[in-house]
Each structure stands twice: as structure tokens, then as C-alpha cells.
Image (cartoon, rainbow, N blue to C red):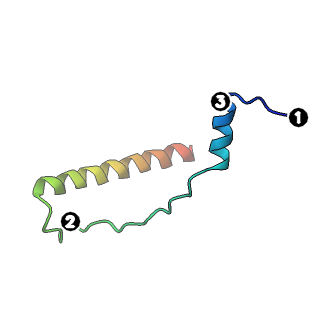
Amino acid sequence: MRTRRSPRNQEILFRELFKPPAIPVQVVEPVDLSKAFWLSPRAKRQIERDRSAAAHKAAVKRALSGA
């Protein structure tokens, strides 16, 4: 059985046949802010705020998944 040669089918087929290679995820160690002399105080505060927000979000996600 033949498939129709519509542009949409061509696109789907092309996407399936020529998938880009998976990019490996690099694990990066967190920066110790007490030793990061190159960061400004404002940048350090922003990093601390982002870390606390991520920790809060993870805690909420854990609590909701356990319910």
C-alpha cells in the first residue's frame, strides 16, 4: 500500500528518518559562592534566590507526587 505524497507526510517521514543525534547532558558542579570572588554581590544574591526557588519548587513537586 502506498502512502500519499503530501507535504505533511513528507515532513513526518523526514523527521523520523533523519533525527538529530542526542546531545549528552553534562553534569556541572554547583558554584561555591563563598569562593566565587569573580561574581558580584548582586549576582551572588540572584544565584541564591534561584537556588532557593528551585529547592522550593522541587519540594512542592515531591509533596504533590507523594499525595
**Residues marked 3 and 2 touching at CB (< 8 Å):** no
Q: Is label 3 in a helix, a strand or a loop?
A: helix
Q: Provide the residue designation for mark 3.
A: 8
Q: Is label 1 in a helix, a strand or a loop?
A: loop
Residue at image position (55%, 58%) is: 22
The reply, left or right, for residue 23 in relation to residue 38 is right
Quadrant holding the C terminus:
top right
**Where residue 2 sits: x, y (%)?**
84, 34
Choose between 57 and 19: the one closer to the eye: 19
Amino acid type, mark 3: Arg
Q: Provide the residue designation for mark 1.
A: 1
Q: Provide the residue designation for mark 2.
A: 33
**Where residue 29 sits: x, y (%)?**
35, 68
Q: Which of the two marks, 3 or 2, is nearer to us in this view?
A: 3
Residue at image position (20%, 51%) is: 46
Label 3 or label 2, whichever comes before in sequence order: 3
Choose between 22 and 32: the one closer to the eye: 22
Label 2 or label 1, whichever comes before in sequence order: 1
Choose between 34 and 67: the one closer to the eye: 34
Quadrant holding the N terminus:
top right
The reply, left or right, for residue 57 in relation to residue 45 is right
Amino acid type, mark 1: Met
**Residues marked 1 and 3 touching at CB (< 8 Å):** no
- Category of crowding for the residue at label 1, using alpha-carbon neighbours closer than 10 angstroms: few (below 14), some (14–19), many (at least 20): few
**Where residue 51 sits: x, y (%)?**
30, 54
**In the rendering, which numbered label is found on residue 58?**
none
Amino acid type, mark 2: Leu
Residue at image position (56%, 57%) is: 21
**Alpha carbons under labels 2 and 1: distance apart:** 63 Å
Choose between 50 and 1: the one closer to the eye: 1
